[in-house]
Amino acid sequence: MTPDPITGVVYHWLGGLASASFYVPYRWVRRWNWEIFWITGGVFSWVIAPWLFAGLQTRDLTGVLAATPAPVIGWCVLFGMLWGLGGLTYGLTMRYLGLSLGMAVVLGLCTVFGTLIPPLVQGDFAAKLLVPAGGRIVLAGLGVTILGIVVVALAGARKDAAQDDAQKSAAIAEFDFRKGLAVAVFSGIMSACFAFGLAAGEPIKALSAAAGTGPLWTGLPILCLVMAGGLVTNLIWCAILIVRNRSAGQWLGRAAPAQGTARVPVAANLALCALAGTAWYFQFFFYSMGESQMGRLGFSSWTLHMASIIIFGTLWGFAFREWKGAARGTLLTVIGGIGLLVIATIVIGYGNSLLLAG
């Protein structure tokens, strides 16, 4: 199959939409502690969905994984565990900063580390990005991406400075700018490890293709391994919180003492968590498809993915009135940041096209 960067961009945008939307169903979960709904949704994200779709689309999934060298599996799982720390604190970032501002800070760092480090580690940074004109255009697109992220974050900081505590909590119940910013920085750095896990799993693609798997789906077995690592990290932390808060009974419909005797909507909560968890998986499902269309330029997939998440995440922030009451200048700033991210996506796609044509 001939690489098609334009189609790859579309897939990355679909993945960005899924990622930006995954936390939305959690907003309607009732009378469950954060650790309960987070790990419930995580079972769908990290176990059910990866193995289901990989099993459906991969020819001889178990045979492919059995033939994978142990060090490759180990690196994928290890990077997945590190990424799990980023994913865990990503959820906390949404609690403290909201969808739009939280995503801008976290994903800004993800973009930089996840795009630039793999070529540096592989030793072909200059060959891919500095020597060819298309590579320099991709770097320019990355620069525009970073600028757009800074602009969006600046708008969020201005909104924070202009609102009182009541206005902040009305839009985001647990808003805490300082705590959220610290968590977001950590999350952004650790979340970039997902890109490293995908790079470590490159040999699995060849094994999957040799088994007869179609080009769009060769990366799905890698997701099973990386996300298994993410499950380990999140499961440990959520288990600690469940024991500390004595919240396990919420799965059986028993509310926490502070919540009174009102009924816990277990079935509705499970459905919402399943929707949220599956949506989070689909960001990587479409990411894998998009990367397969980028050919040797897969390193730029991370930038496209991150930019699209921020775009859709900011739009969700508007939909949930997180920017209600913001000054006109602040709104124009965040709109300008989104515009820069759209331009960056176009620039990176164009640079990829030039590289492939060359």
Image (cartoon, rainbow, N blue to C red):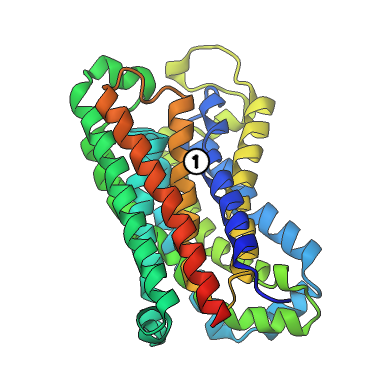
Q: Residues within 10 Å of mark 1 (few under 14, many from 20)?
A: many
Q: Secondary structure at mark 1?
A: helix
Q: Position of residue 5 (x, y in %)?
A: 59, 67
Given residues 280 and 125, the one toward you in this image is 125
Q: In the rendered image, which quarter is residue 171 located in?
A: top left
| Residue assigned mark 1 | 312
Instruction: Find residue 79 and report its horizontal and vertical position in percent.
Output: 45, 69
Which of 131/48 is in front? 131
Q: State which quadrant residue 62 falls in.
A: bottom right
Residue lying at the far top in this picture: please name it: 261
Q: Please state if 131 lies on the left or on the right of 283 as rendered.
A: left
Please report the residue visible at 43 percent of the width from the left and 42 percent of the height from the top. 91
Q: Is residue 45 above or below residue 140?
A: above
Rendered position, 100 above or below 129: above
Tell which of 266 and 107 is nearer to you. Answer: 107
For residue 239, side relative to residue 3 (left or right): left
